[in-house]
Image (tube, grey):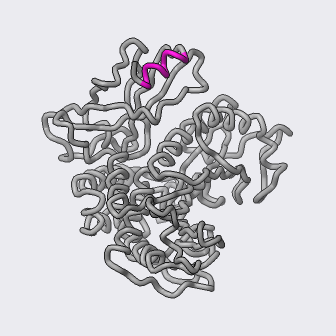
Amino acid sequence: MSLISEWLRERRITEVECVTPDFTGIARGKIVPREKFNEDEGMRLPQVVLVQTVTGEYAEDITPATDPDMVLIPDPNTIRLVPWAKDPVAQVIHDCFHFDGSPVELSPRYVLRRVLKLYEDRGWEPVVAPEMEFYIVDINRDPDLPLQPPLGRTGRPETGRKAYSIDAVNEYDDLFEDVYDYCDAQGLQIDTLIHEVGACQMEINFLHGNALELADQIFLFKRTVREAAIRHQMYATFMAKPMENEPGSAMHIHMSVVDKTTGKNIFSNDDGLPSELFYQSIAGMQKYFPAVISLFAPFVNSYRRLTRYYAAPINVQWGFDNRTCGIRVPHSTPAARRIENRVPGVDCNPYLALAATLACGYLGILEKLSPSEPLTGDAYSLPFAFERGLEGAITALADCKPISDVLGEKFIQAYCAVKQAEYVEYVKVISPWERKHLLLHV
């Protein structure tokens, strides 16, 4: 009996949720009865499920006209309980393959695996630690109405800024007790919980570990928090900028690289000083982050977060313990020396954001680049380095051959096509601002 079959039998599982992440990070797949689950044969899904827009439409000319299937094979390392299900239900993340056994290059999980293989070929393993910011909001049934903070245990909604307030977090104790219980049941390695700057804006940090495993955990974590919030008559949102007068939400990524033979951090020399590889990685991020910004900021809303003086980076400056920079180096021991990517919004696909971060660092090492001098002042006072909207960001990604070589040409073409389709659909919408200020005034 296989490991998965034994796991399912021991827990008397009745159903299995067979899932894989699409470009948006939505769980696509099938729910099958336990007796119909076959880990060797896997399951079949149309390839186009990976490349739906966030509205559920399809971009043109990115999959064969015959609309072929792909084979999804479960990764036994990802099987977990669904802790909120009434009956014993399991969930397992699948990898995507063609019928000849080759990987589907459009799969976000494969894109990350592809980048990790480049590090593995050098005898290295990236170590990452994500930080997830998100808002909890009152139930909102009308998308034309602004979001509002939910009622806390005192019966009042949160007002003002309550960064790092313990009492403000305790207003929602019951919700976060469920979040912690659900995460523990799934083996999601969350660490600290803090209140961020915005009204009912929270942050949960993950323990550092393997990049693919952390991407899986974030993928499941978003679903977990949303589910817990709904059970408490609230919403949890991972929009980058859900409220116009509040800060946006980020997914900061701490990254280091370990030599698999020696176990040492390659960002530090034996004398404890930063290594040449450390500086080259920073330089790669400085050079290529503008090209991959659409992977860090994947939606039209994402660019509302990247605003000067609003706790989000606007350029590729780097500095030691400087939170105004897009690339920050926290204080640490030589063994824990790491680079923090502060650019991604929490709305990003975790597989793609991690892949892009690691790809940029890798290209810096490959090209032996040198970074600028570390910034000691305010990076917000310097010019923007990123495109100011999704359309320009798509073009920047499509035009960058080194990134295409690392992440895969087919993936880049498909991703840009999906994002272009989303942008075209968005610009058709007439906003309340336009009706308010233009209807009778122009």
Stretch in magenta:
3-11
Residue 26 showing in the rendered view: yes
Q: Position of residue 233 (x, y in %)?
A: 68, 31
Magenta span main SS? helix
Residue 426 as seen in the image, left or right of residue 43: right
Residue located 76% across and 34% down the image: 174
Q: Position of residue 416 (x, y in %)?
A: 29, 56
Residue 71 as seen in the image, left or right of residue 227: left
Q: Position of residue 262 (x, y in %)?
A: 48, 63
Residue 228 image-quadrant placement: top right
Foreground residue, 51 or 358? 358
Residue located 53% across and 74% down the image: 268
Residue located 50% across and 58% down the image: 127
Residue 438 showing in the rendered view: no
Q: Position of residue 59 (x, y in %)?
A: 26, 46
Residue 4 included in the magenta stretch of the image: yes
Residue 307 as seen in the image, left or right of residue 430: right
Foreground residue, 184 or 20? 184
Quadrant (top left, top right, bottom left, bottom right) of the N terminus: top left
Residue 45 image-quadrant placement: top left
Residue 27 lies, with reference to residue 15, above or below; the image says below
Residue 424 lies, with reference to residue 373, above or below; the image says above
Foreground residue, 365 or 390? 365
Foreground residue, 314 or 174? 174
